Amino acid sequence: MKWLHPGAWAAWAVAAGVAALLLRNPLYLVLIALAAGLVWAAQRQGSQRTLLSGRGLARLGATILVFSTGLNMLFSHSGYTALWRLPPTLPYIGGPVTLEAALYGLTTGLSILAVLIVVMAFNAAVEPAELLRYLPGFLNSAGLVATIALTFAPQTQRALSEIREAQQVRGHRPRGLRDLPPLVVPLITSGLENAVGLAEAMAARGFGQSAASASATAQALRIRAGLSLSLLGLLAGMFLYGFDPSRLVPAVGLSAISGLALLGLLWWSGRGNRRSRYRNRPWRREDTFVAGLSGVLLIGLVAAYWMDPVQAVYDPYPRVTPPPFMPALGAMLLLLTVPAWMVAYSSRNEERGDKVGE
């Protein structure tokens, strides 16, 4: 099922994530969420790391939308279309509750939901251990932690389901907080056993047991000092431009030099990390096709946002108006569904091959 290269999936996820963050328009956000949901549904059939079912995702999405809309309605009192008024004596939330605030909160919730579905689709498509191979050396430790977390989370969910089923067979029905220990205690115990087993396996492979020499410690301190100075230089250049836009050249020069130094030090710090080498998955024409479509979508998004940001970002303030919609931009967003159709086509060919083999 996971026949695309991780790099192609990463390009798709970047394009979809940028679209969800850049296009603050509910019409476009719905298209992005539906496209990412289609890819997630195509990938989750063979994935053992899916945390949510379709119904669970619907409940989570409804919760995000309701919370985001309600929060903005309570704390933002801008807009002309008042739905009702809260007593002005209430701190922070007192005042008119407007339709404009509700639509702005709904748009924010749609953006969060779209990004979440994109992340879920990427997680279902790429194995964490496989993704770890392609991370740069300085992200090896952080990638290892993320890989463990992405692996343990669905295992914990499956363990909880098994414990709940076992308790139901024994007649246990949790009705309150007092009835939760028979479910929580076995879950914690099994989680600790898995953690201890993983720690012993990592220790047996020598992870974290290499003694650092004095020269290595001094080099690590120099690298950290260089990283701190480079980051300060990058922030100083950004601050200089924000404080005085007329000093564009020195601000850009300072930021560029500091940024290059930061990237160089990060690369240098990761050179000493030794990892096992495995045979990487070959890059195929399908990967080039998906990565190329993702690049075209990114270029189109940036161009559309630069030429007409009003069409890309919907602002219901000060009065509600229908959100604009560009058919060309909507058609470009449909490119996000291409991996789902390719997965479906590949699965159909595999089924046909299995039937012919039988």
Image (tube, grey):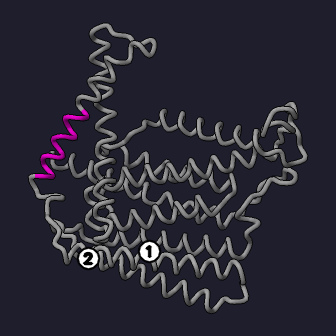
Does residue 273 sit above or below 125 in this rendering?
below
| Residue 195 covered by magenta stretch | yes
At 33% across and 63% down in the image, what residue appears?
6
Q: Main secondary structure of the magenta part?
A: helix
Between 286 and 240, the residue placed more toward the observer is 240
**Amino acid type of the residue that numbered disc 2 sits on in the rendered structure:** Ala
Q: Which mark is residue 228?
A: 1
The amino acid marked with disc number 1 is Ser
Range of the magenta residues?
191-203
Q: Residue at x 41, y 71 (%)?
A: 289
Q: In front: 200, or 48?
A: 200
Are the two marked residues, 1 and 2, in contact with CB atoms closer than 8 angstroms?
A: no
Q: How many marks?
A: 2
x then y, percent, for residue 187: 29, 27
Q: Quadrant of residue 216?
A: bottom left
**127 vs 18: above or below:** above
Residue on which disc 2 sits: 218
Q: SS at mark 1?
A: helix
Task: Choose between 103 and 270: the one closer to the eye.
Answer: 270
Residue drawn where x is 44% and y is 84% of the image: 260
In this image, 1 relative to 242: left or right? Answer: left
Q: CA distance from mark 1 to mark 2?
A: 15 Å
Q: Secondary structure at mark 2?
A: helix
Q: Which mark is residue 285?
A: none
Residue 168: x and y in percent read 32, 13
Q: Residues within 10 Å of mark 1 (few under 14, many from 20)?
A: few
Indicate left or right for 62 with 227 as reference. right
Depth-wise, is mark 1 or mark 2 nearer the camera? Answer: 2
